[in-house]
Image: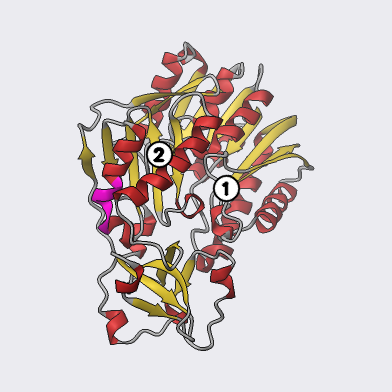
Amino acid sequence: MTASSLPVLRLKPKTKPQAIRRGYPWVYANEVVTDRRTRAMTPGTIAVLEDSDRSPLAMVGVNPNSKIIGRVLDMPEAAAPDQGWFATRLRKAQDLRERLFSSPYYRLVHAEADGLPGVIIDRFGDIAVIQPNAAWADLLLDDLTAALADVTGVTTILKNAGGRGRGLEGLDDVDAVLLGDAPTEPVPVHMNGAIYMADLVSGQKTGLFFDQRPNHAFAAALADGARVLDVFSHVGGFGLAALAGGAQHAHCVDGSEPALALATEGARRMGAGDRLTTTRGDAFSVLTSLAEDNAEFDVVICDPPAFAPSHKARDAGLRAYERIARLAAPLVAKDGFLVLCSCSHAADMSAFTGACLRGIGRAGRHAQLIHTGQAGPDHPLMPQLAESGYLKALFFRL
């Protein structure tokens, strides 16, 4: 389909187009003329975005059911996405990852930053997991799947429909096997000298968090000979990295028994099974109990889920991060290390750092900030979209 035959989404007269011209990838529903024709568009419709003077700005994917009514896909004169269009973007994304990593275990597509708004693709060797978290990508999933198989050579492609974004787009929550056969066992992933067991079918999100890879490595460098506590550990992210870095012992805490079982299996495969213990429970309660028992660790890491997933939840989320810091800091031995993480895009680095320092101060501890981490390079940041720089990791010496 050519640009001239595409429907039109038009900005209101008071909406300035400069942000789109400078690369901002989202158009909000309150910025466009939402007449009967616009409201009748099928979610996922490809359209041309025009300014109020009818000058074309971009080709966009439209979803009248979402607050983000338009997602910028290409220049306004471009042909509508097809398999070849997807293949061009996937090759560019893969070329970058192949320069960065020696084996095909990484985030292959990081949504807007890789030119595929709302699309997440993680690769696990011959298996790829797609999260099509925008209506336009969901509608064109067959073309995306075919291009992904062609470009990467993967033999299994899974659709993960568990992302929060799909709910905001009004999309289904039905997982699917798009190509090949779903794995019947967790997939071992080697990172930073550790072995992680990724459940690609029933695990959280795509099964493993590649974004923390460089922060795992920094924590591992602090862990030689140390007693380590990894809270919100999932499948052992920081704990297993610490064991690979020579930790004397690591204790993982998480609310999911299956995730902890995967951490235990990873440690066993590393030959470190006797140096890992686990506790299933609420993190706040476990931290409180450990303090009552006068427990002490050389390195404490807290990597919680997003406490502030939206601007509406920002203040409550910051209070939760402060509480985590207050409960964790007393468990750190003198001159030990406290690592606090946030994956909340609504809480920027300054606000998150302030919350952590308030918590540490309320615990009666003094801190040196020795390192600030972010997501790895397979999670590139789109400079025009602050939300793409969501991950923050603060390394304190107390």
User: Type of residue at label 1?
Assistant: Leu
Q: Nearer the viewer, residue 295 or 114?
A: 114
Please report the residue visible at 63 percent of the width from the left and 57 percent of the height from the top. 348
User: Type of residue at label 2?
Assistant: Asp
Mark 2 or mark 1: which comes first in sequence?
2
Label 2 crowd (10 A; few <14 / some 14-19 / many >=20): many
Magenta stretch contains residue 143: yes
Position in image of residue 373 (x %, y %): 65, 41
The residue wearing badge 2 is 122
Position in image of residue 70 (x %, y %): 41, 69
Magenta stretch contains residue 129: no
Please report the residue visible at 48 percent of the width from the left and 55 percent of the height from the top. 112
Q: Nearer the viewer, residue 287 or 249?
A: 249
Label 1 crowd (10 A; few <14 / some 14-19 / many >=20): many
Q: The N terminus is located in which quarter?
A: bottom left
Q: Which mark is residue 391?
A: 1
The residue segment tinted magenta is: 139-144
Select label 2 or label 1 by which is in front: 2
Where on the picture, by quarter, is residue 129?
top left
Element assignment for label 2:
strand
Element assignment for label 1:
loop
Position in image of residue 24 (x %, y %): 54, 65
